């Protein structure tokens, strides 16, 4: 039987949740039935070495800071001409495919539209809440983004709320199939991961994982730690991740004399050893589609405190499987305080987290949902 030939388009394999989910999907693909290609727009990221050996890998530019890419993007924004962007991917990708998938919003779907004649089945993934974080708007001219989505056959969302918010921003033709598929999470592998690391905590420890960027609101978390300290709570916070705001956040910690409480531990792949050794997991993000790190925290049985954003609300269900808070620092402080003070509540949410992970995440089910997309 002839294998179906698939092409995935993605920006780069940096240390984000969508990147890790894509790597997970590749790890569970049935390569006896599918031939899989990956086209990265930029040849960079911490997960480059994790691409499955059966995946054929292409890239367009060495880096997102490429002068040629910057010029081509600028030309399109100023004049509407996309000749150079189009030529770049069509010179690299010359084959025809059974299905082409852009695995993210933004530049992935922007380049996807140049290959519409290379397949009869086009799918794109949406990971964000477009109402709260329409971060892709700067990439497109006028109604181009909506036009590109209307050229797809199917649009996949990582949560029901992400789909709902998407449809308040864009007018999508009824003929285009819309479907929710939760991120692929390997609960057993997460729970059984056993890396020998000398991870020791000195006191009650709060863990947070994510890129050090504005949308993650780590500056708020630092202010919350100051509030905890002012109220005589002796805690440590482990921040796992790198990003553009690292120096700024480190300066904030120093300015507030929290060097003995907050530790920047850098990007960890995977972060499970640190997460397992912490007492509470916290997310202070402004926006989350369906956060991988929260899924991992559930799989590890960690009590969770999270701001109310799209993914966490759907995962934690009105405080049933974790504590949801408003986005202000006082609310985050109260959410953490109640778990620090109440060991029984931590134990309860730990048990609830494991229940949620076991009921929600099923690799075979998720992969079968993905395979179903490939049927024209």
Image (cartoon, rainbow, N blue to C red):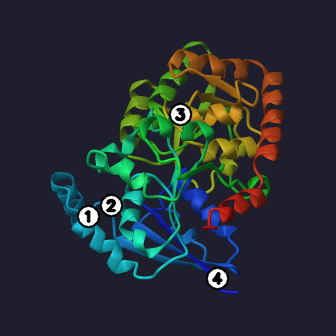
Disc on the earlier residue, 4 or 2 = 4
Q: Which of marks 2 and 3 is in front?
A: 2
Q: Mark 3 points at which residue?
A: 262
Q: How much space separates mark 2 and mark 3, taking CA atoms?
A: 31 Å
| In this view, the mark in front (4 or 3) | 4
Q: In this view, does 149 lie above or below 245?
A: below
Closest to the camera, between mark 2 and mark 1, is: 1
Q: Distance between the residues labelled 4 and 1?
A: 34 Å
Position of residue 115 in the picture relative to residue 346 (left or right)? left
User: Residue at label 4?
Assistant: 3
The image shows residue 279, relative to residue 77, as above or below, that is above
Q: How crowded is mark 3: few (under 14 residues within 10 Å), some or many (20 or more)?
A: many
Q: Earlier in the sequence, mark 4 or mark 3?
A: 4
Q: In this view, does 219 lie to the left or right of 201?
A: left
Q: Which residue is tagged 1?
A: 69
Q: Where residue 27 appears, x then y in whole percent?
A: 66, 68
Mark 2 = which residue? 64
Front residue (pair 364, 206): 364
SS assignment at label 3: strand
Give the CA separation, mark 2 to mark 1: 7 Å
Asked whether the residues under the numbered discs 1 and 3 touch, taking CB atoms below 8 Å apart as contact, a structural biologist would say no
| Mark before the other along the chain sequence, 4 or 1 | 4
Q: Distance between the residues labelled 4 and 2?
A: 33 Å
Q: Is residue 206 left or right of residue 141?
A: right
**Disc 4 crowd, CA 10 A, few/some/many (<14, 14-19, 20+):** few
The image quadrant of residue 303 is top right
Upstream in sequence: badge 1 or badge 3: 1
Q: Where is residue 362 in the image (x, y as percent from the top left)?
A: 78, 54
Label 2 packing within 10 angstroms: few (<14), some (14-19), many (20+): some
């Amino acid at each position: 039987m002839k294998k179906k030939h698939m092409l995935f388009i993605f920006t780069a394999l940096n240390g984000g949740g969508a990147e890790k989910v894509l790597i997970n999907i590749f790890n569970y693909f049935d390569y006896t039935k599918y031939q899989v290609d990956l086209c990265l727009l930029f040849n960079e990221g911490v997960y480059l070495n994790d691409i499955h050996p059966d995946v054929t890998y292409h890239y367009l530019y060495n880096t997102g800071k490429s002068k040629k890419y910057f010029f081509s993007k600028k030309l399109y924004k100023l004049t509407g001409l996309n000749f150079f962007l189009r030529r770049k991917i069509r010179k690299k990708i010359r084959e025809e495919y059974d299905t082409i998938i852009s695995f993210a919003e933004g530049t992935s779907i922007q380049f996807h539209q140049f290959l519409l004649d290379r397949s009869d089945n086009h799918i794109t993934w949406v990971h964000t809440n477009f109402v709260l974080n329409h971060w892709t708007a700067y990439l497109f001219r006028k109604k181009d983004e909506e036009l590109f989505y209307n050229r797809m056959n199917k649009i996949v969302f990582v949560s029901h709320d992400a789909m709902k918010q998407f449809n308040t921003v864009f007018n999508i033709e009824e003929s285009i199939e819309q479907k929710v598929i939760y991120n692929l999470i390997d609960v057993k592998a997460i729970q059984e991961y056993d890396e020998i690391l000398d991870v020791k905590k000195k006191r009650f420890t709060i863990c947070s994982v994510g890129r050090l960027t504005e949308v993650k609101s780590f500056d708020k978390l630092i202010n919350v730690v100051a509030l905890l300290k002012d109220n005589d709570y002796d805690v440590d916070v482990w921040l796992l991740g790198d990003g553009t705001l690292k120096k700024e956040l480190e300066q904030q910690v120093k300015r507030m004399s929290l060097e003995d409480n907050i530790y920047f531990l850098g990007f960890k792949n995977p972060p499970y050893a640190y997460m397992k050794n912490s007492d509470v997991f916290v997310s202070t993000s402004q926006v989350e589609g369906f956060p991988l790190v929260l899924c991992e925290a559930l799989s590890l049985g960690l009590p969770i405190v999270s701001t109310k954003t799209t993914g966490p609300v759907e995962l934690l269900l009105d405080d049933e499987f974790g504590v949801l808070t408003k986005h202000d620092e006082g609310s985050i402080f109260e959410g953490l305080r109640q778990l620090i003070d109440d060991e029984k509540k931590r134990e309860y949410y730990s048990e609830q987290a494991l229940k949620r992970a076991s009921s929600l995440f099923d690799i075979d089910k998720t992969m079968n949902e993905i395979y179903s997309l490939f049927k024209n």
